[in-house]
Image (cartoon, grey):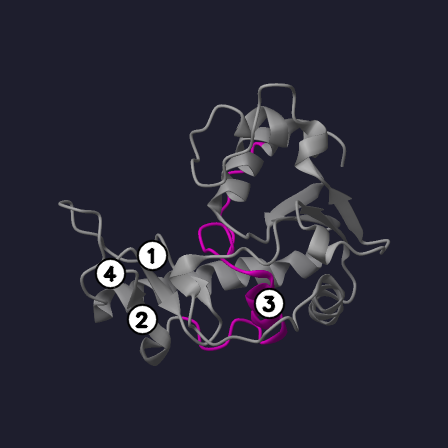
């Protein structure tokens, strides 16, 4: 495949289904974070500055996840959980350092996208109401797909790319670089999408039908 396919979130369901359909093995920055649209735009605009800074990390939901309170994202898979009740009890410095090393590695891969022939960015959802992020201050409503495209253009001025945006009618945009899909239009009778259950049997065929159109 000459075209690289890269997840832009908003959660790990996207990366999982992309790997199944496109045969992707390489990880990318947004694969395993829960990233509302505003946070996505800010991260791209700021070139991921300040991620995994200790002062920005908070355990939320009685240990159910770790939030970055600067950007308003969840590092749901980046910190140790106890075996008893699957909760994060403490943010340890060695884990922060390990995540910073991983970030640097994946950030280099992100930077190298500018040398690709073409890239398909894939994004599911936009506002992503997330109870664990309630009360965390982040830019309200300022990060829309138009700003995302502008930020990507600044980052990768020579790159040919498209964005596949799914199930985000509040963020749909008429633009030559954006392809919008409603997964309901690719759902057979008796099927449904379940973004909270990565093993749900209907997710894969629905995503496969969408991916086959781009």
- Nearest to the observer: residue 165 or residue 31: 165
- Under tag 1, what secondary structure? loop
User: Which comes sooner in the sequence, label 2 or label 1?
Assistant: 2
The answer to if 40 sits in the magenta stretch is yes
Task: State which quarter of the image contains the C terminus.
Answer: top right
Rendered position, 3 above or below 42: above
Q: Residue at the top extreme?
A: 189
Helix, strand or loop at label 4? It is loop
**Distance between the Cα atoms at labels 2 and 1?**
13 Å
Residue at the spot of label 1: 78
Name the residue tied to disc 4: 62
Disc 2 marks which residue?
58
Residue 134's quadrant in the figure?
bottom left
Residue 156, position in %: x, y? Answer: 72, 65
Frontmost of labels 4 and 1 is 4
Q: Nearer the viewer, residue 132 or 105?
A: 132
| Mark carried by residue 38 | 3
The span picked out in magenta is: 23-51
Q: Residue at x 85, y 55 (%)?
A: 174
First in sequence: mark 3 vs mark 4: 3
- CA–CA distance between discs 4 and 1? 16 Å
Question: Which disc, if any, is residue 165?
Answer: none
Q: Residues within 10 Å of mark 4 (few under 14, many from 20)?
A: few
Sequence-wise, the earlier of marks 2 and 3 is 3
Quarter that holds the N terminus: top right
User: Where in the figure is residue 158, as x and y percent of width and height?
Assistant: 79, 63
In space, the residues marked 3 and 4 are separated at their CA atoms by 25 Å
Q: Residues within 10 Å of mark 2 (few under 14, many from 20)?
A: some
Separation of marks 2 and 3 at Cα, in angstroms: 19 Å
């Amino acid at each position: 495949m000459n075209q690289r396919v890269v997840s832009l979130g908003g959660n790990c369901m996207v990366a999982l289904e992309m790997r199944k359909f496109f045969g992707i093995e390489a990880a990318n920055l947004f694969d395993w974070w829960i990233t509302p649209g505003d946070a996505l735009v800010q991260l791209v605009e700021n070139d991921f500055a300040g991620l995994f800074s200790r002062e920005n990390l908070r355990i939320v939901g009685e240990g159910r996840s770790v939030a970055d309170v600067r950007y308003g994202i969840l590092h749901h898979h980046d910190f140790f959980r106890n075996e008893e009740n699957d909760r994060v009890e403490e943010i340890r410095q060695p884990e922060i350092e390990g995540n910073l090393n991983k970030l640097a590695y994946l950030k280099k891969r992100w930077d190298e996208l500018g040398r690709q022939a073409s890239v398909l960015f894939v994004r599911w959802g936009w506002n992503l109401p997330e109870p664990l992020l309630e009360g965390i201050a982040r830019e309200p409503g300022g990060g829309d797909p138009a700003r995302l495209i502008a930020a990507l253009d600044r980052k990768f001025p020579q790159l040919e790319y498209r964005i596949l945006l799914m199930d985000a009618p509040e963020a749909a945009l008429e633009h030559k670089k954006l392809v919008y899909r409603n997964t309901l239009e690719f759902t057979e009778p008796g099927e449904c999408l379940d973004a909270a259950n990565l093993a749900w049997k209907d997710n894969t065929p629905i995503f496969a039908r969408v991916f086959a159109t781009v």
